[in-house]
């Protein structure tokens, strides 16, 4: 436990900013998807990948802090612009801009195409099962597409929910789920999240903060959230276990 605390402190207070590279790939409808690739310093060619998806109204900029810390654990990270989103942390959503130009639909469910394309891209690069990391609506989609998918090792889901009206029922879609899951939420979302994930019966962790109310989505990991260290402690424990 002491070693884990030290590791979280290093992740939180390191002043080293890991460089990232912008990459693009194609969704099934030929939309160009933009992402930022963060490579780890720990044997990048053989490292496992974490693929990160943002919440509604945001962009890959949601993970400017988070990806730079996860790579220090030994993972490569790919932070993806989904077509349903806009801007955050001064990073514009380039996939959404391109989708608008092509007059393609940009609802939450339409972003599933981008998630599947990102999975294929990361799996082709890594040649091993990857970890999906979602926030709000993208956390729900990450869980749904991971079920039965041999390209996925596990899922990190921050504040998933039923965001798709009559198009998709997430709780029902998770029957027979077969991957380890780390789910996190704010205090007020905890009971709802327990019910949402009731069909995941094993290898499931649901985290809520104890020292504060927490945040919706992966903003919970930002330094601006007073209880971010609690979230990081739990997340690091899960991610370290996935490296084994």
Image: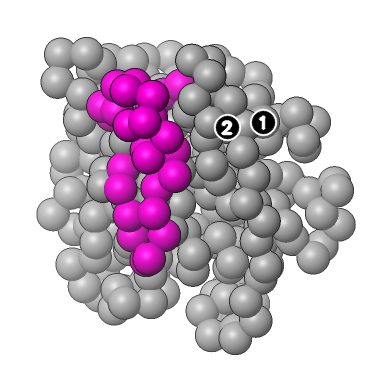
Q: Of helix, strand and loop, which one carries label 2?
A: helix
**Residue 62 found in image quarter:** bottom left
Q: Residues within 10 Å of mark 1 (few under 14, many from 20)?
A: some
Residue 110: % across, % down: 34, 22
What is the spatial separation of the Cα atoms under label 2 and label 1, in whole angstroms? 5 Å
Residue shown at the point (67%, 35%) measured from the top left: 122
Residue shown at the point (48%, 15%) measured from the top left: 29
Q: Is residue 46 visible?
A: yes
Badges 2 and 1: C-beta atoms under 8 Å apart?
Answer: yes
For the N terminus, give its image quadrant: bottom right
Q: Which mark is residue 162?
A: none
Asked whether, in this view, residue 101 is left or right of residue 210, the answer is right
The foreground one among 49 and 192 is 49
- How many numbered tags mark residues here? 2
Q: Of helix, strand and loop, which one carries label 1?
A: helix
The foreground one among 231 and 25 is 25
Magenta span includes 93: yes
Residue 156: % across, % down: 47, 44
Label 2 sits on residue:
118
Q: Residues within 10 Å of mark 2 (few under 14, many from 20)?
A: many
- Above or below — where is 17 with respect to 130? below
Asked whether, in this view, residue 75 is left or right of residue 97, the answer is right
**Residue 129 found in image quarter:** top right
Q: Which residues are magenta?
A: 85-113
- Above or below — where is 134 with respect to 9? above
- Above or below — where is 102 with respect to 183? above
Label 1 sits on residue:
121
Residue 167: % across, % down: 22, 13
């Amino acid at each position: 436990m002491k070693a884990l605390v030290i590791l979280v402190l290093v992740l939180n207070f390191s002043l080293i900013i890991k460089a990232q590279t912008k990459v693009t790939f194609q969704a099934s409808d030929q939309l160009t998807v933009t992402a930022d690739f963060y490579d780890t310093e720990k044997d990048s060619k053989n490292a496992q990948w974490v693929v990160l998806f943002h919440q509604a109204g945001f962009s890959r900029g949601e993970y400017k802090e988070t990806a730079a810390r996860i790579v220090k654990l030994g993972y490569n990270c790919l932070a993806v612009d989904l077509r349903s989103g806009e801007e955050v942390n001064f990073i514009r959503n380039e996939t959404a801009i391109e989708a608008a130009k092509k007059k393609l639909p940009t609802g939450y469910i339409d972003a599933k195409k981008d998630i599947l394309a990102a999975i294929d891209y990361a799996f082709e690069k890594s040649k091993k099962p990857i970890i999906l990391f979602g926030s709000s609506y993208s956390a729900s989609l990450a869980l749904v597409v991971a079920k039965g998918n041999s390209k996925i090792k596990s899922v990190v889901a921050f504040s998933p929910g039923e965001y798709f009206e009559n198009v998709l029922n997430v709780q029902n879609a998770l029957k027979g789920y077969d991957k380890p899951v780390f789910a996190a939420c704010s205090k007020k979302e905890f009971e709802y999240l327990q019910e949402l994930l009731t069909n995941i019966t094993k290898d499931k962790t649901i985290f809520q903060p104890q020292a504060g109310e927490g945040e919706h989505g992966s903003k919970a990991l930002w330094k601006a959230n007073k209880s971010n260290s609690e979230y990081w402690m739990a997340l690091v424990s899960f991610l370290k276990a996935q490296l084994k």
